[in-house]
Amino acid sequence: MPKKKSVAKIITKWFLILIVGAAGGFLLNYALLPVLAKTDFCQHWPFFRNLSQGTTIINQTQQTTITENLAWQKITEQAIRSLAGIETTLNKKTISVATGFALTNDGLVVVPTDLIAKDRQYSINYNGENFPAIVFSTNPQISLSLLKIDRNNLFVLALADDAQIKLSEPVLLAGLNRDAQQNWLPFVNQGIVSGLPGKNILTTITEKNPMANGSLLINLSGEIIGVNLIDAKQGMITLPASQIKALLEQALKK
């Protein structure tokens, strides 16, 4: 009989502890903490600042995902500012269109070399404005060329270091389409780096849009890690940033 009383007392004791603890937690969350959060002293801590603004971070993974999405939005906006729509004509007839991008702020624009041919004329649409362009330098060996327009203060993205490219890192393709009304409209595609065979960069991006010819490949830091070329036989080929740097160095030496 005494043992039964002892067990009953223990159960009653723990039950009372749980009730008191729950009540204390309720009072702490809904009475004490909100009052403390409004004091100047507690505003020095992020926890109390978030509490006073009605913000509670429950899942750190969710917060990281939201942060990354916001970063991609900002990078996309920057990439679009550096893109240029390229049109080549012969006797006022359009021969081809492609994407290019500003390499220097004084008017040098990178374009695929397959656009360059004798007697063709070139027009570049940059941020909604059309400019006549001339061939500044070409290098068939790396399939890239430079056109020059009479425009300063072009928005330029930094070129990444090839050695810093990592397998599975997220990347963004950014290019320009041209619609039936001759408007240049941006498009993007996301993926990851899937291979680094040495000469080119391999990604999981499957892009069949011919306007991806000359488009950018950008990392999460907002740097250009490569330029995409559309080959009729091999599909999309991505040349690393080092070849863009080599193109510019060769052009400046000449």
Image (cartoon, rainbow, N blue to C red):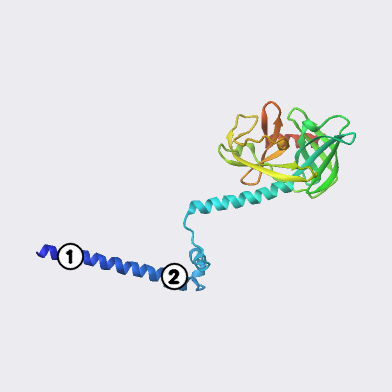
Q: Quadrant of residue 166?
A: top right
Residue 136's quadrant in the figure? top right
Residue 33 spot, x, y in % from top left: 44, 70
Residue at position x 13%, y 63% from top? Answer: 4
| Numbered label attached to residue 8 | 1
Q: Quadrant of the C terminus?
A: top right
Q: Nearer the viewer, residue 162 or 186?
A: 186
In the drawing, does residue 134 fall left or right of residue 54? right
Q: In this orientation, does residue 115 appear?
A: yes
Q: Is residue 177 above or below residue 141?
A: below
The residue sitting at the top extreme is 233
Q: Residue at x 89, y 31 (%)?
A: 119
Going from the N terminus, do you reach mark 1 or mark 2 first?
1
Report the residue marked by disc 2: 33
Quarter of the figure with the N terminus? bottom left
Q: Provide the secondary structure element on which disc 2 rests.
A: helix
Marks 1/2: CA–CA distance = 36 Å
Q: Residue 140: horizontal and vertical position, in percent?
A: 77, 28
Residue 36 spot, x, y in % from top left:
46, 72
- Extreme residue in the left direction: 1
Determine if residue 102 is in view.
no
Mark number, residue 254 = none
> In the image, what residue type sits under mark 2?
Leu
Q: How many marks?
A: 2
Q: Is residue 1 left or right of residue 123?
A: left
Q: Is residue 127 above or below residue 23?
A: above
SS state under label 1: helix
Which three-letter amino acid code belongs to the residue tagged 1? Answer: Ala
* Residue drawn where x is 80% and y is 41% of the image: 108
> What residue is at 22 percent from the left and 67 percent from the top?
12
